[in-house]
Image (tube, grey):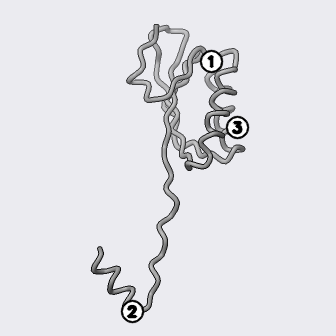
Amino acid sequence: MRLFNLFLRRAGIQQVAAPARRTSSRLTVVCRRASMADIRKQIYCNFGAAGLTVVAIQVDKAPDPNLVSACVTIDCPPELRATLMSQARQLRAHPDVKALQWGDHRHIALN
């Protein structure tokens, strides 16, 4: 790669700057099964309005049959990290959300 960059410099071509690095964050939301559709809609609307991109939501059953666990993957640039934390706090305040933790649902043990 260094040799190629040297070739570009000698040819008088400026190297294109790399795009800003984006990072993915995952959070797991445990909520009542009956309210999952409303919470999913809220996640997409609120996070999108804040400039965050929801890449995927994977819904799985929880140990309690009345609950579901949703693993949410969010594409978040570093400068919007505070916005992501704010959105997570708002989501946690929803009355039907029983738990919200950072990380993949496979690594979280529910009490």
Name the quadrant containing residue 1: bottom left
> What residue is shown at x 39% (from left), y 92% (from top)?
11
* Residue 46, label in figure: 3
Identify the mark nearer the N-term, 2 or 1. Answer: 2
Spatial CA span between label 3 and label 1: 15 Å
Q: Residue furthest bottom?
A: 11
**22 shown above or below 34:** below
Which type of secondary structure does the marked residue at label 1 adopt? strand
Of 58 and 11, nearer the camera is 11
Instruction: Identify which residue is drawn at 69% across, 27% down.
Output: 90
* Residue type beneath disc 3: Asn
In percent of width and height, residue 79 lies at 60, 49
Asked if marks 2 and 1 touch (Cβ < 8 Å), the reply is no
- Could you say which quadrant of the image residue 82 lies in? top right
Question: Label 1: few (<14), some or many (≥20) within 10 Å?
Answer: some
**In the displayed structure image, the side of residue 7 where residue 67 appears, left or right:** right
Query: Disc 2 residue type?
Result: Ala
Question: Pointer 2: what residue?
Answer: 11
Q: Earlier in the sequence, mark 3 or mark 2?
A: 2
The mark nearer the N terminus, 3 or 1, is 3
Q: Is residue 40 positioned above or below 96 on the image?
A: below
Spatial CA span between label 2 and label 1: 59 Å
Image depth: mark 2 or mark 1 in front: 2
- Judging by the rendered image, the residue that carries numbered circle 1 is 97
User: Does residue 75 sit above or below 65 in this rendering?
Assistant: below
Alpha carbons under labels 3 and 2: distance apart: 48 Å
Q: Secondary structure at mark 3?
A: helix
